[in-house]
Image (cartoon, rainbow, N blue to C red):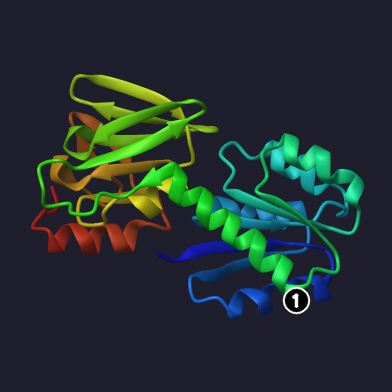
C-alpha cells in the first residue's frame, strides 16, 4: 500500500533531506514539493495526499495556518526549527513533531508512528470473499463495524466522512484518503477527491459522473482516466 506524500518547506535543503529519506522507504511516494502554502494548496486540491511533512515558518501563511485551512487534512508530521510550536501542532492532532535538523532514525520513528495509526484506525478484512466483510472505524471512543456490502458511497465533509447506505447514513470523524487506502479496490473506487463509490452499486456512468442509487456523483478531473478504465473492465458501459 503506497503512501502519497507532500513536502512543504521554504528551505530547499530541508526538502532535499526529507525527499532523500522517503526514497529509502519502499511504501512512500513523494507526490509534490511546495515552498509555501499557496503552492501546497494547489497540490492538495489536485492530488490524493496521505501524509504531509510540514514546516511552520513560511512566507505569508504559516504551516499551522495552512493546516487549519484544510477541510479534511491528511496525516501531518511537522518539521520545524522552533520547538515552541510543538504544543500548537499537537493540538491540531499532528502525528509527530520533528526538530530540525532531523536525523534519519528520528524521521523513521515518526513515519512508523503514522503507519501504526493508519493500521489502528482502519482494519482490512482478511478475506473479502467471505460473507463477513467488515471494516472497523474508530471515531474517538466509539468503534463502528460497517459491512462493506451495505455501503453505497462515501462522501468527504470537511474533517468528517459520511457513509451512505440503502437504509440511512453514518457520519464519523475520519479522513477519506485513509478509507481509500484501506477499502478493497475490487469493490470500491475513488472517483473524486470527495467521493468513493461501491462499484457494484453503480447504475451507469458518463464522462462527467456516475449514478448510484439515483444520486449523480461527479467524476473528478484527475480521476477520470482510471475511473473509466476500471469501469469498462468491470463491464459497465457509457450511457
Callout 1: helix, strand or loop? helix
Which percent across, then down, holds residue 79? 78, 58
Q: Residue at x 19, y 47 (%)?
A: 199
User: Is residue 193 visible in this depiction of the protein?
Assistant: no
**Where is mark 1, residue-wise?**
17
50 to the left or right of 21? left
Image quarter (top left, top right, bottom left or bottom right) of the N terminus: bottom left
Decide: few, some or many residues near mark 1? Use Cα within 10 Å; few <14, some 14-19, many ≥20. Answer: some
Q: Residue at x 86, y 54 (%)?
A: 58
Q: Residue at x 36, y 51 (%)?
A: 182
- Work out whether residue 203 or residue 102 is closer to the camera in this orientation and state it: 102
Q: Is residue 168 above or below residue 140?
A: above
Q: Is residue 2 above or below residue 214?
A: below
Q: Quadrant of residue 42?
A: bottom right
Q: Total marks drawn?
A: 1
Which percent across, then down, holds residue 110? 66, 59
208 to the left or right of 139? left
Q: Residue at x 77, y 42 (%)?
A: 89
- Work out whether residue 207 or residue 20 is closer to the camera in this orientation and state it: 20
Which percent across, then down, holds residue 18? 71, 72
Q: Is residue 144 above or below residue 189?
A: above
Q: Quadrant of residue 156?
A: top left
- Work out whether residue 155 or residue 218 is closer to the camera in this orientation and state it: 155
Q: Residue furthest top?
A: 168
User: Is residue 91 visible in this depiction of the protein?
Assistant: yes
Amino acid at each position: 500500500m503506497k503512501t502519497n506524500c507532500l513536502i512543504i518547506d521554504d528551505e530547499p535543503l530541508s526538502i532535499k533531506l526529507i525527499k532523500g529519506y522517503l526514497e529509502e522507504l519502499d511504501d512512500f511516494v513523494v507526490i509534490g514539493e511546495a515552498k509555501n502554502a499557496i503552492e501546497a494548496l494547489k497540490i492538495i486540491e489536485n492530488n490524493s495526499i496521505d501524509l504531509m511533512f510540514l514546516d511552520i515558518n513560511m512566507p505569508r501563511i504559516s504551516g499551522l495556518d495552512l493546516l487549519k485551512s484544510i477541510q479534511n487534512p491528511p496525516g501531518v508530521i511537522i518539521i520545524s526549527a522552533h520547538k515552541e510550536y510543538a504544543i500548537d501542532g499537537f493540538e491540531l492532532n499532528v502525528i509527530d513533531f520533528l526538530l530540525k535538523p532531523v536525523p534519519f532514525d528520528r524521521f523513521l520513528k515518526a513515519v512508523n508512528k503514522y503507519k501504526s495509526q493508519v493500521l489502528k484506525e482502519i482494519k482490512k478484512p482478511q478475506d473479502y470473499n467471505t460473507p463477513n466483510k467488515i471494516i472497523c472505524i474508530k471515531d474517538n471512543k466509539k468503534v463502528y463495524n460497517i459491512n462493506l456490502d451495505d455501503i453505497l458511497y462515501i462522501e468527504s465533509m470537511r474533517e468528517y466522512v459520511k457513509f451512505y447506505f440503502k437504509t440511512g447514513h453514518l457520519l464519523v470523524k475520519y479522513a477519506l484518503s485513509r478509507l481509500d487506502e484501506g477499502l478493497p479496490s475490487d469493490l470500491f473506487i475513488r472517483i473524486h477527491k470527495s467521493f468513493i463509490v461501491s462499484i457494484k452499486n453503480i447504475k451507469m456512468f458518463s464522462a462527467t459522473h456516475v449514478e448510484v442509487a439515483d444520486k449523480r456523483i461527479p467524476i473528478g478531473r484527475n480521476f477520470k482516466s482510471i475511473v473509466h478504465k476500471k469501469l469498462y473492465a468491470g463491464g459497465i458501459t457509457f450511457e
